[in-house]
Amino acid sequence: MQQITFAKEFSEIIHKRRSVRIFDQKSVFNHEIVTQCLELATLSPNSSNLQLWEFYRVKESSSKFSALVKLCMGQKAAKTARELVVVVARRDLWKSRAKANYAYIEECYKDADPKKQKQALSYYGNLIPKLYSKYPGWSVLKKGIAFAAGLGSPMVREVSETAVRISVHKSVALAAMTFMHAMTAHGYDTCPMEGFDSKRVKKLLNLPAPSEISMIIACGKGLPEGIYGERFRIPNKAVIHEIP
């Protein structure tokens, strides 16, 4: 059987995607496409499958759209967007997400060898709580444990509270990239923005206190003038290294 690949199409999507800063406000914009692309984003790889992300959509028709644009420092990408997607990291939801994974694995392994079932469940029932729990001094203690364990054999070092937070944001960023590629595949453009007042955005959208905004993605049909010049990248030989 001949293998079907999508390498050509994927390459075209990668080269087509640009951060567009001016969108066409007159053309028809299908918000249902955003729905479909966000659903694809939830299929992105993420650390321990905890899926610690949320996406808040603010359409151009929303009563809060203008206020959000202002909090994005009035950037043209935000001002001309047809929809703004606020990508949020929810590190605080680890317990409920771990519980959901635990239940799923428990069901999958219900007819398996008890020993294998115990090993599979211990990841979410034992390891994840140790890594994600927060109480005074625990972050420092985790680093000490990792250091001691690493003296005799390979050991994951990124166990501090800061490292866990970074891990969550890495997973969120993977989902955001999937979303932007999906939008490109549908013929739409995006612009990920980091220039915004996170404190006021959280208040405007009534986001939970523990949530952290990773980025805000402007969506629309890009205009030619929305691309500020040819794409520039550092030479590949400066960033891609082969270890002999």
Image (cartoon, rainbow, N blue to C red):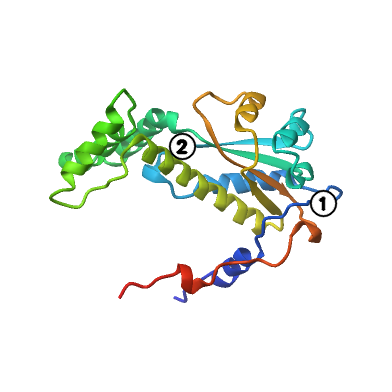
Residue linked to disc 2 = 52
Expressed as whole percent of the image width and height from the top left, the position of residue 129 reads 30, 31
Q: Which mark is residue 24?
A: 1
Q: Residue at x 34, y 26 (%)?
A: 134
Q: Which mark is residue 226?
A: none
Q: Secondary structure at mark 1?
A: loop
Q: Residue at x 63, y 24 (%)?
A: 203
Image quarter (top left, top right, bottom left or bottom right) of the N terminus? bottom left
Does any portion of residue 206 appear in the rendered image?
yes
Give the Cα separation between the discs numbered 1 and 2: 33 Å
Expressed as whole percent of the image width and height from the top left, the position of residue 117 reads 22, 40
In the foreground, 59 or 196: 196
Q: Residue at x 25, y 41 (%)?
A: 120
In the foreground, 235 or 227: 235
Furthest residue toward right: 26
- Packing grade of label 2 (10 A; few <14, some 14-19, many >=20) is many
Considering only vertical position in the picture, is 15 above or below 78?
below
The answer to whether residue 100 is left or right of residue 150 is right
The answer to whether marks 1 and 2 mark residues whose Cβ atoms lie closer than 8 Å is no
Expressed as whole percent of the image width and height from the top left, the position of residue 184 reads 66, 57
In the foreground, 59 or 108: 59
Considering only vertical position in the picture, is 7 above or below 91?
below
Does any portion of residue 4 appear in the rendered image?
no
The answer to whether residue 124 is left or right of residue 54 is left
In the foreground, 36 or 181: 181
Q: Quadrant of residue 133?
A: top left
Q: Secondary structure at mark 2?
A: loop
The answer to whether residue 216 is left or right of residue 122 is right
Three-letter amino acid code of the residue under disc 2? Leu
- Packing grade of label 1 (10 A; few <14, some 14-19, many >=20) is some
* First along the sequence among labels 1 and 2: 1
